[in-house]
Amino acid sequence: MNLKSEVFLSVVAYSLCSGTLVLLNKLTLHHLPYPSLVVSFQLLAALIFIYGAKHTGRLQVDALEWQYVLPYLFYILLFSVGVFCNMKSLSMSNVETVIVFRALSPCIVAFLDVLFLGREYPSLQSWTGLSLIALGAYGYASF
């Protein structure tokens, strides 16, 4: 398989998984309206899957070492807050709203990169891509 086909299939697979997960989370939250509990179950399932694959020899997993874990605790906390906010927004709004805001996040990140990290403004090609994202989100929200 050539690189373009592999990239295309990866994007399609990611989009299908992401969209399906949003719909399943919304359905789950409809029946179990506790976002933190749903996230906890999902993270626990991921841990069980990883350590189950480790113990069956299908996956090599390094042992947790606190000297490496401690510096990342802040990022872990921020990740958890982000996932919780996503679940909370799913429980309080419709799926379309969450999809539009998730689609627009690269546009916001591009501006925040310039503002807070001192990075360059996006190139013309990036502006084109960001504009297509914004146009697609607008079209999705409008129709």
Image: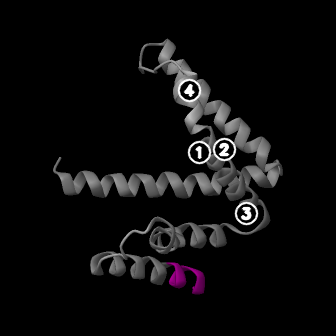
Q: Earlier in the sequence, mark 4 or mark 1?
A: 4
* Circle 1 residue: 75
**Distance from the alpha carbon under mark 1 to that under mark 3:** 21 Å
Q: Main secondary structure of the magenta part?
A: helix
Q: Amino acid at mark 4?
A: Phe
Q: Which of the image's four quarters has the C terminus?
A: bottom right
Q: Earlier in the sequence, mark 1 or mark 3?
A: 1
Residue 49 — which label?
4
**Distance from the alpha carbon under mark 4 to that under mark 3:** 27 Å
Mark 4 or 1, closer to the camera: 1
- Are the residues tagged 1 and 3 within 8 Å (C-beta)? no
- Are the residues tagged 2 and 1 within 8 Å (C-beta)? yes
* Circle 3 residue: 89
**Distance from the alpha carbon under mark 2 to that under mark 1:** 5 Å
Q: Residue at coordinates 53% horizontally, 68% vertically from top-left?
A: 105
Q: Residue furthest front?
A: 118
Q: Amino acid at mark 3?
A: Ser
Mark 4 or 2, closer to the camera: 2
**Distance from the alpha carbon under mark 4 to that under mark 2:** 21 Å
